[in-house]
Image: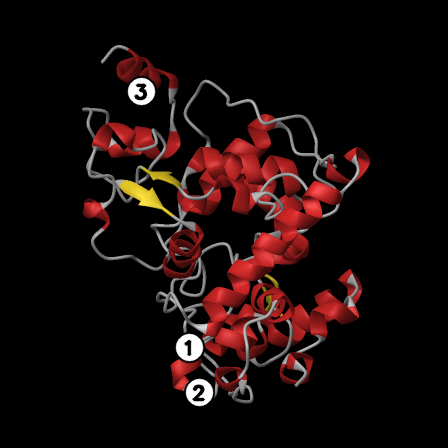
Amino acid sequence: MSYLNSTQPAKQRGLSLLAASITATVIGVGVMAAVIAFTPVPASDSVNAEPSVEYGRLLVRETAAMMGPGHADPAMRFSGSSMDCASCHLDTGTEPGTLSLLQTDSAYPRFSGRDGGIRDLRDRINGCMTRSMNGKELPRDSIEMVSIEMYIKNLNQQYALMGESKTTPAEPAQFNEPNRRADIDAGEVVFRERCQVCHGDDGQGLLQTTNPADGYLFPPLWGPDSFNNGAGMTRLLTAARFIKARMPLGQPDLTDDEAYDVAAFMNSHERPQRENLELDYPDLTNKPIDSPYPPYADEFPVDQHRYGPFEPIRDYYRNL
């Protein structure tokens, strides 16, 4: 059986920026409404298949089509968004550097401060499913879970065989955090000048086709089809590091201040709300200083945890 027969190949056709702009004009302000107007994709027969590295790769690359809210089979609707895992894990995680999946397997199992215990790779995958993808957990022994795990483990094996030149990230200098509160207004200027050409003037991304079930060419940065408020990308420093390393796509040349401010602008908008976030981090001293939601083990205001400056918060924990 070939899993390729049930996927949408639009990403592989490599739409040009001009074509993307034309598509954006056609979709226009209807993107928000189109998120609800799904044309279901064909039901996958993966439930009768064996787990495989290739199927795992397709799930990462074509998450919306394979497991998204527009899937014809309700039992396969695990993701709550029409984004793909590859929306953040660029080139399906094969590119060295920020948010690469090449070495992920070697990091697990490990302690998770958010969960308060030791977590394995499958736990981490489900963390992404329920937060970054705003969906629900994959059953731990499902074909989908095992296939994604196999794919990530295979990437780790590939990494071990790659030469040094292949494992060196093609990224700018590491992000250096400005010692100030992020400037949301300045971030909007950066967004208008450098980001909206791909992500839309309303931040709602650019769909691959008029059918949201086919997923996004460029993902939404906020709004109902984006990652929820429990995702790691809602943390200002996490988002700024990613933006500095990877954005704009193909030409990551923002300054530290620009990355910092535009990350704040992105995260100043509404997005899906995850329930029971107050249960995260049983030991609140393990909570990241830029976690945007309370409670905290300190008396600093929520606004400072969201937008900085962060050095006073660090000093507080250093002196505990």
- Horizontally, residue 107 falls left or right of residue 137, namely right
- Crowding at label 3, few (<14), some or many (≥20) Cα neighbours within 10 Å? some
Indicate the quadrant containing the C terminus: top left, top right, bottom left or bottom right. Answer: top left
Nearest to the observer: residue 261 or residue 146: 146
Q: Which residue is mark 3?
A: 313
Q: Are marks 2 and 1 in contact (CB under 8 Å)?
A: yes
Q: Amino acid at mark 2?
A: Asp
Mark 2–mark 1 Cα distance, whole angstroms, equals 7 Å
* Residue located at (35% from left, 65% from top): 137
| Rendered view: 277 above or below 252 | below
Percent coordinates x, y for residue 220 in the rendering: 52, 59
Q: Amino acid at mark 1?
A: Arg
Percent coordinates x, y for residue 65 in the rendering: 56, 76
Q: Secondary structure at mark 1?
A: loop
Q: Amino acid at mark 3?
A: Ile
Circle nearer the N terminus (3, 2)? 2
For the question of whether residue 213 can be seen, the reply is yes
Q: Which residue is mark 1?
A: 77
Q: Secondary structure at mark 2?
A: loop
Mark 3–mark 2 Cα distance, whole angstroms, equals 47 Å
- Horizontally, residue 9 falls left or right of residue 72, namely right
Residue 255 quadrant:
top right
Nearest to the observer: residue 18 or residue 14: 14
Residue 73 is tagged as 2
Percent coordinates x, y for residue 126 in the rendering: 39, 58
Residue 91 quadrant:
bottom right
